[in-house]
Image (cartoon, rainbow, N blue to C red):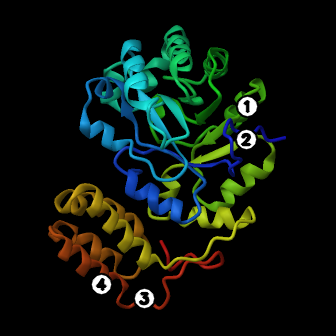
């Protein structure tokens, strides 16, 4: 039986996993419009929040049912960030503590997955956050730092410290995003705990997510790289779960996504940031190579709009449907 998430409303347990530089407010907004039930923000530094950093506060802007992911290792920074900036807000559902980020600059600063090596520190951070947060608190972990031999111990420490639910990425820190996610260990963690466990890793198609949800071996799924260039994955899942979600033309999604980035970040940053999304959107499409080679020439919003015009000029049908995805990504 699937364990229920600690929210007043029951949501389909499908999450957009946070990915730095990709899952910002604009992408989350697009995903929500396509049927995404729940999202987690990009990581937010509690140290930066405690210093009232305006840029950091803007990252955590929410749209739809969202958890704000926070990271750090200094407990006084967690306290100030939560009490001063997060508890007063009403626009997010829960806090998610990151113990999984493998990025070298994060690990070097003793944050993210570095903390998987220090169970006492994990316990103390979670207990501190639970004590002062006025909303549920979850945690995100990897299976370990160098190997997964202590994965169950890490997860049990988090449960004992009081997290309301746990998201597990099926790789160690040293794996980064290489190899295959170890779902058997994720399932073993779920069996050893009594709180909801969300699985993350290598969910590339809607069918992958649906099979996991129907397996009875996990309480929910978090989709990361599988949604890049294909936020339609959430429409497919929603329809499979009995939700009424309409098809949306790819062209409409691409143009709206860029428009939202313009609104959020201004022309220069929007143009630069959208290039990496455009590469994902055009994968396997006619003229994709031409568009990819021309990315360096896109310097203004007018240039980007012209690229869209070229991309969609000769497309017979860009409407996404469940039976034909070859014209979409």
User: As rendered, which of 236 and 281 lies closer to the eye?
Assistant: 236
The residue wearing badge 1 is 190
Residue 39, position in %: x, y? 53, 48
Quarter of the image for residue 78 reads: top left
Q: Mark 2 and mark 1 in contact (Cβ < 8 Å)?
A: yes
Q: Is residue 121 above or below residue 69?
A: above
Dot 2 falls on a residue whose secondary structure is: loop
Q: Which residue is mark 3?
A: 315
Q: Total number of numbered labels?
A: 4
Relative to residue 237, is residue 117 depicted above or below?
A: above
Q: Position of residue 182 (x, y in %)?
A: 63, 37
Residue drawn at (44%, 32%) of the image:
88
Disc 3 residue crowd, few under 14, some 14–19, many 20+, Cα 10 Å: few
The answer to whether 139 is drawn above or below residue 28 in the figure is: above
- What residue sits 67% from the left and 54% below the top? 209
312 relative position to 87: left or right: left
Q: Position of residue 126 (x, y in %)?
A: 54, 18
Res. 309 mark = 4
Circle 3 sits in a helix, a strand or a loop, which is it?
loop
Q: Which residue is mark 2?
A: 219
Q: Identify the residue at the far right of this view.
A: 1
């Amino acid at each position: 039986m699937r364990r229920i998430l600690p929210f007043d409303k029951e949501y389909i347990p499908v999450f957009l996993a946070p990915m730095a530089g990709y899952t910002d407010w604009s992408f989350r907004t697009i995903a929500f419009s396509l049927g995404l039930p729940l999202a987690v923000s990009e990581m937010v530094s509690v140290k930066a929040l405690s210093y009232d950093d305006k840029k950091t506060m803007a990252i955590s802007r929410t749209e739809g049912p969202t958890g704000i992911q926070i990271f750090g290792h200094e407990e006084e920074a967690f306290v100030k960030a939560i009490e001063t900036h997060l508890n007063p807000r009403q626009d997010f559902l829960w806090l998610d503590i990151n113990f999984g980020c493998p990025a070298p600059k994060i690990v070097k600063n003793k944050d993210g997955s570095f903390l998987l090596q220090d169970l006492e520190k994990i316990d103390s951070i979670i207990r501190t956050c639970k004590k002062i947060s006025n909303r549920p608190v979850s945690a995100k972990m990897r299976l370990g730092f160098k190997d997964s031999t202590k994965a169950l111990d890490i997860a049990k420490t988090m449960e004992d410290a009081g997290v309301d639910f746990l998201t597990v990425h099926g790789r160690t820190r040293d794996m980064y995003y290489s190899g295959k996610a170890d779902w058997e260990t994720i399932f073993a963690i779920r069996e050893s705990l009594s709180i909801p466990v969300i699985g993350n890793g290598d969910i590339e198609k809607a069918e992958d997510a649906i099979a996991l949800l129907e397996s009875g071996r996990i309480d929910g799924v978090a989709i990361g790289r599988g949604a890049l260039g294909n936020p339609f994955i959430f429409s497919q899942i929603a329809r499979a779960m009995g939700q009424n979600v309409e098809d949306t033309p790819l062209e409409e999604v691409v143009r709206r996504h860029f428009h939202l980035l313009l609104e959020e970040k201004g022309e220069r940053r929007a143009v630069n940031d959208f290039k990496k999304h455009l590469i994902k959107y055009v994968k396997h499409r006619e003229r994709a190579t031409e568009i990819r080679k021309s990315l360096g020439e896109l310097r203004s919003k007018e240039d980007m709009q012209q690229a869209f015009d070229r991309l969609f000029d000769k497309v017979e049908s860009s409407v996404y449907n469940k039976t034909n995805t070859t014209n979409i990504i």
